Image: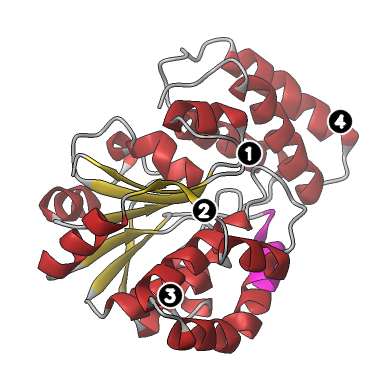
Amino acid sequence: MRTYLDCIPCFFNQALRAGRIATGDENKLKKLLDEIGTMLSDIPLESTPPETGMLIYEKVREITGVLDPYKELKRENTEKALALYDSLKHKVEKSNDRLLTAIRIAIAGNVIDFGVNRKFDIENELDKMLNKDFAIFDYDKFKHYLDKTNEILYIGDNAGESVFDRILIEETKKPAIYVVRAMPVINDVTYEDAVQAGIDKVASILSSGTSAPGTVLETCNAEFKEIYKKSEFVISKGQGNYEGLSDESHPIFFLLKAKCRVIADDIGVNEGDIVLKGMNV
């Protein structure tokens, strides 16, 4: 997905939010915004938002000196999600369609996103997602690809959300590789975050090699690209991964909630809609 003009003020807002978590030094924050403004003027709209985000968060780390501003928030949100794990598993077990319920729960976890909005209510979001209609619902195709695959490549999005991903992985009853970011960026899931969520109990964990807040293949390591190329069934969670992979030709299933108008328009849905979209399937 290309960058739209409406993405630019969002980049500034994200940088300022991360900067303020990292430091209260107004001079550093002013320098951060000044340098991002200069940098953005040279970035073409043809770039994907995660490519730009990678540069922005490099600048946040450089100027504030803080590698992972969201570390404590990620830990807290994972703990909150883990506290819901048993009750969510019970919802899956008593439902008429266990797989679909697990998909809904995984999408509900997508609300945990500091890049878009720090304010969210996990339990309230779960209640809504379990009953909300899908704007795009390629469930039959999803089941078809799941039935014929020997292994799932599951590209994670945010820390905390990974607990909900774990429930879906368990319900697929297939071996899985869970993909994480190479280093902290916003609240995206890293190896450490995935282990805290218990992903290592249900899947092998693989770093994509990128520090972008989304999967941009050009920035990923050779190991991930080779596995991605050979994978028959790819699940991509969240907006950042959609932004990075939506123009690829490989079969992918996107699971997300459209949390901003730009992405909703790009997908062809309304803001706030939930999506199970099969691409190239």
Q: Position of residue 116 (x, y in %)?
A: 66, 42
Mark 4 and mark 3 residues within 8 Å of each other at the beta carbon: no
43 sits to left or right of 160: left
| CA separation in Å, label 1 and label 3 | 33 Å
Q: Amino acid at mark 4?
A: Asn
Q: Amino acid at mark 3?
A: Arg
Residue that label 3 marks: 166
Identify the secondary structure beneath mark 2: loop
| CA separation in Å, label 4 and label 2 | 47 Å
Residue that label 1 marks: 62
- Whichever of callouts 1 and 3 sits on the residue coming sooner in the sequence is 1
Q: Amino acid at mark 2?
A: Asp
- Whichever of callouts 1 and 4 sits on the residue coming sooner in the sequence is 4
Residue that label 4 marks: 27
| CA separation in Å, label 3 and label 2 | 23 Å
Q: Amino acid at mark 1?
A: Glu
Residue that label 2 marks: 133
Q: Main secondary structure of the magenta part?
A: helix
Q: In terms of depth relative to the viewer, which is nearer, 51 or 259?
A: 259
Mark 1 or 3, closer to the camera: 3
Q: Is residue 249 above or below residue 183?
A: above
Q: How many residues crowd mark 2 within 10 Å: few (<14), some (14–19), many (20+)? A: few
- Whichever of callouts 2 and 1 sits on the residue coming sooner in the sequence is 1
- Whichever of callouts 4 and 2 sits on the residue coming sooner in the sequence is 4
| CA separation in Å, label 2 and label 1 | 43 Å
Identify the secondary structure beneath mark 4: helix
- Whichever of callouts 4 and 3 sits on the residue coming sooner in the sequence is 4
